[in-house]
Each structure stands twice: as C-alpha cells, then as structure tokens.
Image (tube, helix red, strand yellow):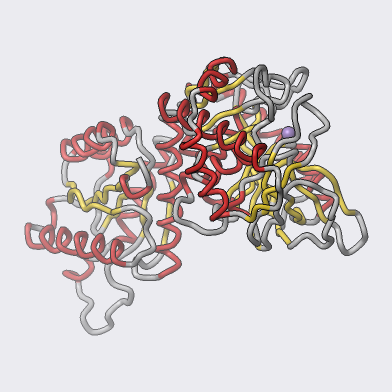
C-alpha cells in the first residue's frame, strides 16, 4: 500500500444535550472541515468524516471498525461541543490505531455581536477539548495533540506530517525484512532482539541464503539487464568504460528485486563477509533499489534497513531524499566543523545534489572484483539522522538534527557518494550527545522528516525516543537518559 491508499477517520465528539439541530450543524461542519482539509493539498492522505459520536456504542463501533479496516491509518478526534468522556473509555481502551486529538474550532473569531448562549452551546471546543484531553491522559493513551485553527496552513501542515508518521506506523506493522547473511562478525550495535522488534514494531525479519540469490542472478536474462541499463544511463552519467561490471550490478539488482517482491519484503540487509558465489558487492544495485523506496542496511544491519524503508514510506512524494548513511570522519577546523558521511558503496541517490556518476573502483574489503557504484555529493539543507538501537529489554530511537552543506572540498580520490553536515547543537556537543545516547555509526539520513514526526512515530510504536537538537546539552541529556532508563524498566 502506498501513501494514497491510506485514509484517516474524523470522529467528532458531541452529546444529545443540545438538541438535533445542533447535532446536524456539527455533522455538516465536520464534513465541511474534512472537505476543506482534503482540498488544502497539505494532507498526504484522505480525511474521511465518519461520525458525530454521542454514545459509548457509537464510539466503540467506530473504533472497532478502525482497528479492522486496513486502509484506516489512524483516527482524528475533534470536540465541536462538549463530549462527556466516560463514553469514550471503552472505545479508546481498545483503540489499536494512532490517535490525534485535533483541538480546533469551527470559527476563527469570537463574534462580538452574534455571541449568545446558543452560540456558546454550539461552539465550545475549548471546553470539550479539556474533557477529551483528560480521558486521554487518564487512560495513558498514546496520542498527539494538535491545537490551532483548521484553516491555517501551519496547522494543516502539522496534521499532514502527523499523518505521515501514522502511515510509517502502518508500514512498520507489516514490514518484512530480507537478510542475506548474518551481521558483520563481532559488531555489537547491529545486533538486536528480533522477537522484541517484531512485538513492538511488527517487523518480520528473516534470512535467505546467499546461494538462493546467486541462483536468481544466474536466471536473469540479458534482455532484462538491457532494460535496467537503459534506466541507469537515463538517470545517471556513465563515467566508466567498464560496461560489463555495471551490467553485473544490474543482474544483482534484478535478482534481489525479484526475491524482495516475491516475499513481500520492503527492506533487506547484506554483508561483504557473505558474498559466496557473487563477483561484486552490490553497489549501484543497492543504491538504485533504495531510490525506488526499498530500505537497505549494510553489514547485516537489519534495523537500519527497516528504518530506511519506513522513513521512505513516510516521505513518499517529498523531494529532499532519505538515505542509508554512515558517519565516517570529522573536519575539526574551528568555525568549519563538519562530519563526513558516506559508505563503502551504498548511499541512496535520492539525496544527491547533481547527477550521480557511475564509476568502477576496487574495494579494499570483501575480497571481490571492483564494484560499480554511484558517486555524488549530497545537497545542502536541514535534515535529521536516525538510529534505532536495542538497549536490552527495549528499543531506543535516537534522532539528531543536522545541517547539511555541499561538501567544502572536492575530495577527488574518494570513490564513493558523500554527504557533509554539522550536527546540532554544534559538532562536538552533538557528537558527545550522540555517543552518550549510544547512537550507531549507521543511520538513516533524511531531509524529509523532522524530529517531531519521529517522536510521534516512536510514541505510536511505544519505544523510547531521544532527540538531540539545538537546545540539547550533555548534562541535560545524561539526566534525561538516567530517568528514562528507570522509567522504561518499570514500564
Ligand atoms: Mn557500514
């Protein structure tokens, strides 16, 4: 399912106290609100007005339907009038989809002359929202509260970004990850509890033999390779005469894509330590699969592969780009402090500033033939890096705000894609915070999500979230991590 296949349900809270006319007006306005929000172009998915709920039964019914209906990625509640919240308890206690409490009201202004007690009865969102908010707090329900006027672009944008996080949750719940080979030997951070990941996040992480991939590669036809080569040369600049090496990557890509699609997997991991029967580590093959929306993790890193797929699904249709990334080295010149991110091959070209070049260079590790890869520079702009780690008993998602720049030097002898950025609040504090929190060297780098969305997603998945941004200090972070550790042990 893609972004447009998901929808969200608008459930409006009310009661019988104000008479049928008020209820008709509420229903009419809820439909008007849904229509206007859909027409705004700021929501990635359709908002469907479902019901003006007045009874416990109506609420439990709509929640049951939302839980069951695959297309429904979440509910958005709004209280035009006062909606006594004990009638929400049974419904909310059983809700299995993300919930956003939209604290808005129909009118922007208090109408000076018009306002009387009839107006007050009909337009009492400020009143109703507090009752509705209490029951969310009392039930400890995971929820998002968005307050503001429904016609404002910023409010609509926030609602849209929350919807994208909820679609990320839906994608996560059905995500399948294909592992070719195990994690790189002796590496700790790429390990993790796959049962815990499936319980919390829904991920089905399983392994397939590299030999099965080699069989699939051998069955790829020259004609299939010709077609993919045409795609490569239309999207990228052929900067090598070694066409056979590039064709071998096309063969790898076609075979991997067939296996992924056959098994319904949106993400995969491989490792240079297990390429039995393969002549090259997949380079452009993995890069071009990522450009199509598949998640990828190197060295068997299935967690980063899955996160890359989820963030790509959340950001469908956006133009900034999302890539598998790795922190490599620093530039520590005062006033010009930057991190250089790259990988030995596999950075997604969705983050490229220009037209990527197809090049062939030897690879020092993996003991295979020189692989073809895409070489490019990442573009500038604000972005985040994300790392999901297994803390033992719980998962922690770390999100750091970064500011990407065009690389400040050409690095002509570096044969891989590269992205340069400065971590917030500044490079060294940012690094100290990241290391203190236990963030991995592998990350998802995205120009299209922000920390608020990832916090929303982590709340939906019921996992720990750590944000490192412009106001973070090492002391404050250590304090938060200490308390968080206690809290998660009690949960
Ligand atoms: Mn790596």
Residue drawn at 63 percent across, 26 percent down: 270
Residue 35 on image: x %, y %: 23, 63
> Which residue of the protein is positioned furthest toward the bottom in this rendering?
113
Q: Is residue 450 visible?
A: no
Residue 281 on image: x %, y %: 68, 30
Quadrant for ligand 1 reads top right
Up-down: is 57 above or below 209? Answer: below
Left or right of residue 436, residue 309 in this image? left
User: Relative to the observer, which residue lies in front, 359 or 270?
Assistant: 359
Left or right of residue 96, residue 221 in this image? right
Left or right of residue 250, residue 135 in this image? left
> Which residue of the protein is positioned furthest toward the left in this rendering?
20
User: Relative to the observer, which residue lies in front, 100 or 357?
Assistant: 357
Residue 347 on image: x %, y %: 66, 44
Residue drawn at 59 percent across, 35 percent down: 296
Q: How many marks?
A: 0
Q: Quadrant of the C terminus?
A: top right
Q: Is residue 110 visible?
A: yes
Residue 476 on image: x %, y %: 75, 46
Residue drawn at 44 percent across, 38 percent down: 169
Using the rendered view, name the quadrant where residue 465 is placed.
Answer: top right
């Amino acid at each position: 399912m893609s972004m447009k296949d998901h929808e969200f349900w608008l459930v409006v809270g009310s009661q019988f106290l104000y008479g049928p006319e008020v209820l008709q007006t509420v229903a009419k306005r809820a439909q008007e609100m849904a229509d206007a929000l859909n027409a705004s172009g700021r929501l990635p998915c359709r908002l469907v007005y479902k019901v003006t709920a007045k009874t416990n039964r109506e609420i439990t019914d709509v929640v049951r339907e939302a839980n069951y209906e695959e297309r429904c990625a979440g509910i958005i509640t709004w209280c035009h009038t006062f909606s006594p919240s004990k009638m929400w308890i049974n419904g909310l206690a059983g809700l299995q989809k993300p919930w956003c409490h939209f604290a808005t009201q129909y009118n922007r202004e208090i109408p000076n002359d018009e306002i009387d007690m009839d107006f007050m009865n009909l337009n009492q969102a400020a009143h109703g929202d507090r009752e509705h908010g209490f029951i969310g707090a009392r039930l400890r329900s995971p929820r998002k509260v968005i307050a503001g006027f429904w016609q404002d672009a910023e409010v609509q944008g926030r609602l849209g970004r929350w919807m994208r996080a909820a679609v990320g949750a839906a994608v996560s719940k059905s995500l399948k990850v294909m592992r070719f080979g195990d994690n790189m030997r002796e590496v700790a951070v790429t390990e993790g509890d796959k049962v815990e990941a499936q319980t919390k996040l829904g991920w089905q992480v399983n392994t397939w033999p590299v030999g099965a991939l080699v069989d699939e590669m051998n069955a790829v036809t020259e004609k299939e390779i010709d077609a993919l080569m045409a795609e490569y040369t239309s999207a990228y600049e052929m900067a090598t005469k070694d066409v056979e090496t590039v064709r071998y990557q096309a063969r790898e890509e076609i075979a991997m894509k067939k296996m992924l699609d056959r098994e319904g997997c949106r993400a995969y991991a491989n490792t240079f330590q297990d390429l039995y029967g393969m002549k090259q580590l997949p380079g452009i093959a993995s890069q071009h699969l990522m450009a199509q929306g598949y998640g990828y993790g190197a060295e068997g890193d299935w967690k980063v592969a899955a996160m890359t797929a989820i963030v790509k699904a959340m950001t469908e249709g956006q133009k900034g780009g999302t890539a598998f990334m790795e922190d490599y080295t620093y530039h520590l010149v005062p006033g010009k402090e930057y991190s250089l991110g790259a990988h030995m091959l596999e950075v997604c070209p969705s983050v490229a500033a220009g037209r990527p070049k197809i090049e062939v260079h030897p690879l020092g590790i993996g003991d295979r033939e020189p692989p073809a890869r895409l070489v490019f520079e990442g573009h500038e702009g604000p972005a985040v890096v994300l790392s999901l780690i297994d803390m033992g008993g719980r998962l922690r998602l770390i999100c750091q705000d970064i500011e990407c720049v065009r690389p400040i030097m050409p690095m002509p002898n570096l044969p891989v894609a590269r992205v340069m950025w400065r971590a917030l609040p500044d490079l060294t504090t940012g690094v100290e915070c990241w290391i203190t929190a236990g963030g991995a060297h592998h990350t998802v780098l995205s120009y299209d999500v922000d920390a608020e969305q990832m916090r929303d997603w982590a709340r939906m998945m019921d996992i720990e979230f750590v944000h490192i941004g412009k106001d973070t200090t090492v002391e404050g972070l250590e304090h938060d991590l200490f308390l968080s550790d206690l809290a998660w042990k009690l949960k």
